[in-house]
Image: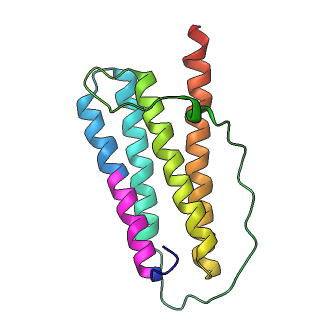
Amino acid sequence: MATNTLREVMDTAIQQEKDAYEFYLHAVDVVKDPGAKVMLKEFAEIELKHKIKLENFELSGIGDEHHTVHHPQHDFNISQYLVDKEITPDSTVQGVMIHAMKREESAYHFYNDMAKVVTSIEIKNLFEALAAEELSHKVRIETEYDDVIYKEF
């Protein structure tokens, strides 16, 4: 993606947030578990906020400045050891959480990678902020997963 225009990178980011939003909304209709439905609705709202933030970002007048990458919060990496499954009507809260972790992890990597290739300080800041938010969501899900799922063992 390093050769894409800034507009193309932003359009890709917007589309990914739109896809995530639509996925979570669809999953709300698919799952039966009430706890999973609540979680999925919350995730959909978060992805919609990201999409709006990207759409409202003004690209005109963006400079080609550079700045230092900030270190994100600690990643527990729980998702690396879990197998992702598609969400179905029989999905449990555990299955939804695993799938959500994987989606948030993927979004984090996308924004983190994009922050490394853009040269505009404004876009770098935006992508770094979104990467940090996605990682924060993943860590939150992992923490809840640890509290809820591992507690059962």
| Residue lying at 33% horizontally and 54% vertically, measured from the top left | 19
| Residue lying at 68% horizontally and 42% vertically, measured from the top left | 75
Numbered range of the magenta stretch = 7-19
Front-lying residue, 137 or 66: 66
The C terminus lies in which quarter of the figure? top right
- Total numbered circles: 0
Asked whether, in this view, residue 70 is left or right of residue 5, the answer is right
Image coordinates of residue 108 in percent, x first then y, are 55, 53
Chief SS of the magenta region: helix
Q: On screen, 84 above or below 116?
A: above
The stretch drawn in magenta includes residue 22:
no
Q: On screen, 47 above or below 25?
A: below
**Which of the 4 quarters of the picture holds residue 43?**
top left
Q: On screen, 32 above or below 109?
A: above
Q: On screen, 106 above or below 111?
A: above
**Which of the 4 quarters of the picture holds residue 62?**
bottom right
Asked whether, in this view, residue 145 is left or right of residue 48, the answer is right
The stretch drawn in magenta includes residue 10:
yes
Asked whether, in this view, residue 58 is left or right of residue 74, the answer is left
